Amino acid sequence: RRRRWLATTVTVAVVTASLGAFAYARLDGRSLPWGRNQASIVPSEKPTWATPSARPPSPAAPWSDWRSAPRTTVRLVGDPDAVLVDGDRVYVFARGADGHVWYIRYEGGRFGAWQRLDGLRVVFDPAATSPQPGRVDVFAVAAKDHRIYQRTLTGGRWTGWQPVDMDLAAGGGLDAASSAPGRVDVAVRTREGELAVVSGGASTPWRSTATTGSGRIVG
């Protein structure tokens, strides 16, 4: 399980190892009329470009019970990643046992159906971020060459999978964040066990930087 701070909210999600199902919990101390399927949404601890007046959650806020989201048609493997878009939509991405990236959207008090992003078989878990309003970027490592590929959702339409950096071979999972409006930073473990960061945006070419040191990143 991993936790990610996303704009004004945080969605905490896990894939259960036994069933490959998706589950989540909420930490806000409020009861919201969302019915059975509830997302875990809390205020962020840090203001962001989208929420300059964000406030930290109450330290006394209790966790809700774990609840299940709609099931997929395939078993989910690995860890999911969640991203908040425009303050009212949550997208959750996960890797399926079929080798494809799957995602589900929560909006208006209910979940949609799971959708598969075709065109690329992946290894390791996907990562997603929203660098600007109305946009989602999802990244994954291709099984065919261990390069990082990207798909973008804008205006309700997905682009195809596009390579990010053909000179960088990933040796493990990756994570993505937006450090400024329109900018995306993707961190990944290389095959040599080093940490590399690939940065770019819609109008900025991708550039990679590898760290140096005596240690190696594992896991």
Image (cartoon, rainbow, N blue to C red):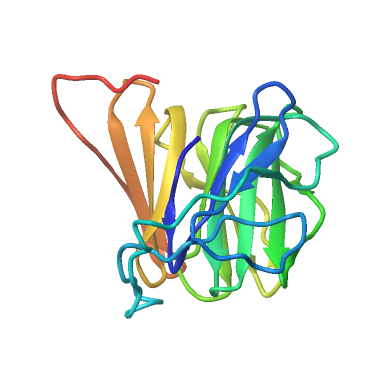
x then y, percent, for residue 124? 55, 29
96 left or right of 196 in image: right
x then y, percent, for residue 155? 68, 75
x then y, percent, for residue 138? 56, 52
Rendered position, 28 above or below 116 = below
Number of callouts: 0
194 left or right of 68 in image: left
Q: Quadrant of residue 197?
A: top left
- In depth, the one of 163 and 86 nearer the eye is 86
Q: Quadrant of residue 204?
A: bottom left
Q: In which quarter of the image is residue 51?
A: bottom left
What residue is drawn where x is 70% and y is 49%? Answer: 103
x then y, percent, for residue 183? 38, 65
- In depth, the one of 170 and 98 nearer the eye is 98
What residue is drawn where x is 70% and y is 21%? Answer: 18
Rendered position, 174 above or below 131 = above
What residue is drawn where x is 31% and y is 37%? Answer: 196
**Residue sitting farthest toward the bottom:** 53
Quadrant of image for the C terminus? top left
Rendered position, 174 above or below 138 = above
- In depth, the one of 177 and 207 nearer the eye is 177
**Residue sitting farthest toward the right:** 73
What residue is drawn where x is 47% and y is 32%? Answer: 173
Rendered position, 30 above or below 191 = below
